Amino acid sequence: SAVISQKPSRDICQRGTSLTIQCQVDSQVTMMFWYRQQPGQSLTLIATANQGSEATYESGFVIDKFPISRPNLTFSTLTVSNMSPEDSSIYLCSVESGTDTQYFGPGTRLTVL
Amino acid sequence: GENVEQHPSTLSVQEGDSAVIKCTYSDSASNYFPWYKQELGKGPQLIIDIRSNVGEKKDQRIAVTLNKTAKHFSLHITETQPEDSAVYFCAASFNYGGSQGNLIFGKGTKLSVKP
């Protein structure tokens, strides 16, 4: 399985600001995913990020609010822009390994005041 | 699109007892069903998965069963221990051409194992 790290692990931010979350994998992977997990809720896919192409966003999520970069096969960033308290969530990145399974990072716990 | 229902939302058992969590899915094309365990403050951890060409899979105290006709799959944990306490998520996806489609998650089951 892949080893995934995320930075920051948690943050408290002010309304109207932006936060960039980093996801680093210990091996090269084609597909990376970003999820949101609202307090006490399940996981919702934000977008799929493949290296060398634009991210594919799920219904309800737009690039202006959640811009994603995927500069290489081991790294991706998700930015949460112009934050409001409703953006307070855990943000998780995951990767698809060679066996078609998804492994998750530890998450970034975001609180917006 | 796919919809995954998970029951129960909370489950409390005594240490040593068995725990069963059930999920149903709506898309008959789904062919991959993983289970994740999420401990407080951590990311989801894959604990077992099953593909549609198999009816049952077991890994020590954990087993998963799949009924394709009824479109439901279940997680069975035997001889539960306090460290099994966590939130468990089921998911479903359609694996095509060697790549996995989007995972659709159930709402989760909070399992509490009382010593």
Image (spheres, coloured by chain):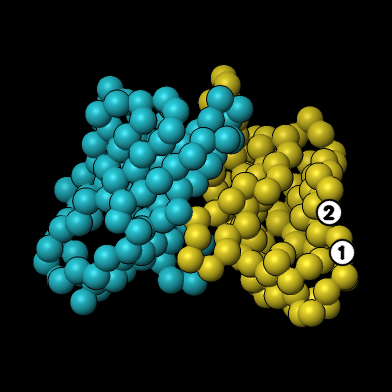
Chain colours: A cyan, B yellow
Q: Position of residue A69 (x, y in %)?
A: 24, 36
Q: Which residue shows up at 84% across the image and 54% down it?
A: B61
The reply to whether residue B32 is in sight is: yes
Residue B79's label in the rendered image is 1
Residue located beneath label 2 in the image: B61
Quarter of the image for the C terminus of chain B: give it. bottom right
Q: Is residue B16 left or right of residue B33?
A: right
Q: Which residue shows up at 57% across the image and 64% down it?
A: B39
Instruction: Measure how far apart labels 1 and 2 are at the Cα level.
Output: 7 Å
Q: Is residue A28 left or right of residue B3?
A: left
Mark 1 in CB contact with mark 2 (< 8 angstroms): yes
Q: Which residue shows up at 79% across the image and 30% down it?
A: B53
Asked where in the image residue A32 lies, by quadrant, the reply is: top left
Q: Work out whether residue B44 or residue B34 is closer to the camera in this orientation and state it.
A: B44
Q: In the image, what residue type sits under mark 1?
A: Glu
Chain designation of label 1: B
Q: In the image, what residue type sits under mark 2?
A: Arg
The reply to whether residue B69 is in sight is: no
Q: Position of residue B47 (x, y in %)?
A: 68, 48
Query: Looking at the image, is A98 positioned above or below residue B44?
Result: above
Q: Is residue A68 left or right of residue B92?
A: left
